Image (cartoon, helix red, strand yellow):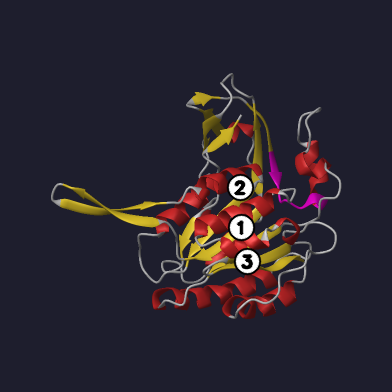
Amino acid sequence: LGGGGWPVAGLQSDDFDVQVDDRPVRIEYVRWTTESVASRGGERAAAPSGTRGGDADRPGLPKGRLIVLLVQKDLEASRIEGLLRMLSEARAFVSGLDADDQVAIAVFTSHLELRTDFTRDRAGTAEALERLVLFPGGAGVQPASGTPSLARGFDRDAGREAASMEQALLVLARALDEVPGSKSLILLGHGFGRTSAITLGPLAAWSVGVEREYGEAARLFARGRVTVFCLDVTRAASHTLESALRRVASDTGGFYLSTDEFPTGAMARVARALAGHYELSFEKPDLPRGEHRIRIRLRGRQGTVFARPTYIG
């Protein structure tokens, strides 16, 4: 992303430097995609002959983008004010989406509930957003007809038993893993994790750890091509639990924003990031099977690269 959070336009292979486990690798091609299947015919033409065009070649995929709004609901004073403000921005965000974009809503309180399946009804979703989030849920969501459907793979019982955000993320990750194509998860919340005190001689500090379910959720997010954008609603310049929000954003190629520092325009910055992204194909290095570190940087261009730090190969 460049200035103002807009994607940098016109990048080619020579504009990127890619390393896997600190070894430079050759980029085969670079492609810009908006995630709109309808717009990908021209994008596939940019790929070398004999390479697949990704999800655009798979039958039955929808047009537009798939977006999940996950709201971490808490009525504590330092959180509810920021949450209400961001819900107002979220309504404007949904209203401004393209006609083919589809949105689903999930809410975590003491457990996880899926409130709406993927839908193109932007006006209805925007009008219902605050009511869906601020009031108790009703009956379970019925899967949307046709594809895609988040509700079809959503384990309602596991959602009811999800007592932590890590467990909730795992339930969502499993459901999203069954939905083809790239997905974006926008988390409006205040953080998660377990704090513990560390004493180093006369000094004391706090350490934040995450539950074991997080590791599996992160793995499934990577496999399911889910990018997480975390908008922290806490009214504080910084706080202990924000580290987990930063972690899940970094692990999935998204970003973290404090809405206390950016009280307006946080959703607008996410919207700009969702305008599209680059897909890079590089020559597979001769390395053992397993997880490998990947680093992508711009060469001779200004901007910040958001990408997953590892891949399985």
Name the spot of residue 275 as percent of width and height, x first: 66, 56
Q: Looking at the rendered structure, which numbered label has been put on residue 185?
A: 1
SS category of the residue bearing label 3: strand
Q: Give the residue type at disc 1.
A: Leu
Q: Quadrant of residue 49?
A: top right
Disc 1 crowd, CA 10 A, few/some/many (<14, 14-19, 20+): many
- Front-most of residues 281 and 293: 293
Q: Which residue is mark 2?
A: 221
Between circles 1 and 2, the one closer to the viewer is: 2
Q: State the separation of the CA atoms marked 3 and 2.
A: 16 Å
Residue contact between numbered discs 1 and 2, judged by CB atoms under 8 Å: yes
Give how far across and how far down residue 287 sits, in percent.
56, 21
Tell whether 161 sits left or right of 41: left
Which residues fall within the magenta stretch?
31-38
The mark found on residue 173 in the picture is none
Q: Amino acid at mark 3?
A: Ala
Q: Give the Cα separation between the discs numbered 3 and 1.
A: 10 Å
Q: Amino acid at mark 2?
A: Phe
- Whether residue 312 appears in this view of the structure is yes
Is residue 304 something that shows in the picture?
Answer: no
Residue drawn at x 80%, y 50% as measured from the top left: 37
- Queried whether the magenta region covers residue 36, the answer comes back as yes
Tell me where residue 246 appears, x and y as whole percent: 45, 53
Q: Secondary structure at mark 1?
A: strand
Q: Is residue 4 left or right of residue 313?
A: left
Q: Residue furthest top?
A: 286
Q: Quadrant of the C terminus?
A: top right
Residue 278 in which image quadrant: top right
Which of the two labelled residues, at mark 3 and mark 2, occupies the earlier sequence position? 3
What's the mark number on residue 106?
3
The crowding category of the residue bearing disc 2, from other C-alpha atoms within 10 Å (few below 14, some 14 to 19, many at least 20), is: many
